[in-house]
Amino acid sequence: MKVDRLKLEIEKFWYKKNVWTTDTNIKDIVYQVIEYLEMGSVRVSNYFNEKWIINEWVKKAIIMYFSIQNMNTIELGPLEFYDKIPIKNKFKEKGIRVVPHAIARYGSYISPGVILMPSYVNIGAYIGENTMIDTWATVGSCAQIGSNVHLSGGVGVGGVLEPLQAHPVIIEDDVFIGSRCILVEGVLIKKGSVLGANVVLTASTRIFDVTNEKAIETKGFIPNYSVVIPGSYPKKFPSGTYYVPCAMIIGKRTESTDKKVSLNQALRTHNLKI
């Protein structure tokens, strides 16, 4: 069934929750959408006309999938799991290197050339070519990760299914995310950026660009090729003034040079901990 037709069917059945688990036609439609997610034929979010568009109907299909699936025992050698969602497999055929104990759920798309160190990738996530998901990094449901990205050890990329209109966390191509960074609530990390260790970004985190005489404040996104470190700013409370976490853009990565040279130069110039 073509994607446009699948979308119409999902939208039609979304408000008929009482028959999701009994109507075989609905089940077949939902299974087809999840298979397309698995293959990378559809995505939760697409880049179109210079902005990211949310495909709410795909999120709806994922939620419906949870509802119609039964709990099952999954055995992997001596390991046992009990869950509704199968585990992704056939990594060799897909050109993906997977180190024990990396786990990816069925319905996530992982491109050829990706390396999964012991990590976790949830359903609906998309990971572009030649990206490294390092040890104990997590990629939440529906998160969108570009090509040639490096998620360092312990990075947490948040997922979001509901509300349906909410953006997932999106990390564009050629981005480096330092150790123990936390990215949640639909933040957008634009192409080529470098985040130093322990940067925490939520939708409400204040981001200060301090590269000019006067700081520029934004929220929710990091511009192209930015170099970012964690910081803090004073805030008054009834009991006194305390320092609240923020993120600071302290420089720009060179766009015109080789990616590796540019990254190394940014790390040396700004003495970044990664």
Image: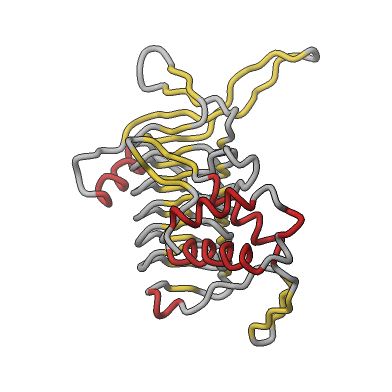
Question: Quick check: 216 above or below 30?
Answer: above
> Is residue 106 rendered to the left or right of residue 196?
right
Which is more toward the observer, 4 or 232? Answer: 4
Question: Quick check: 41 above or below 214?
Answer: below
Q: Is residue 149 visible?
A: yes
Residue 67 position within the rendered picture, expressed as x and y whole percent measured from the top left: 71, 60
Residue at 35 percent of width and 30 percent of height: 251
Q: In terms of image quadrants, where is residue 270?
A: top left
Residue at 37 percent of width and 40 percent of height: 193
Q: Is residue 156 visible?
A: no
Residue at 46 percent of width and 42 percent of height: 196
Residue 55 position within the rendered picture, expressed as x and y whole percent measured from the top left: 50, 45
Residue at 37 percent of width and 74 percent of height: 95
> Is residue 62 rendered to the left or right of residue 16?
left
Residue at the bottom extreme?
A: 77
Give the quadrant of the N terminus. Answer: bottom left
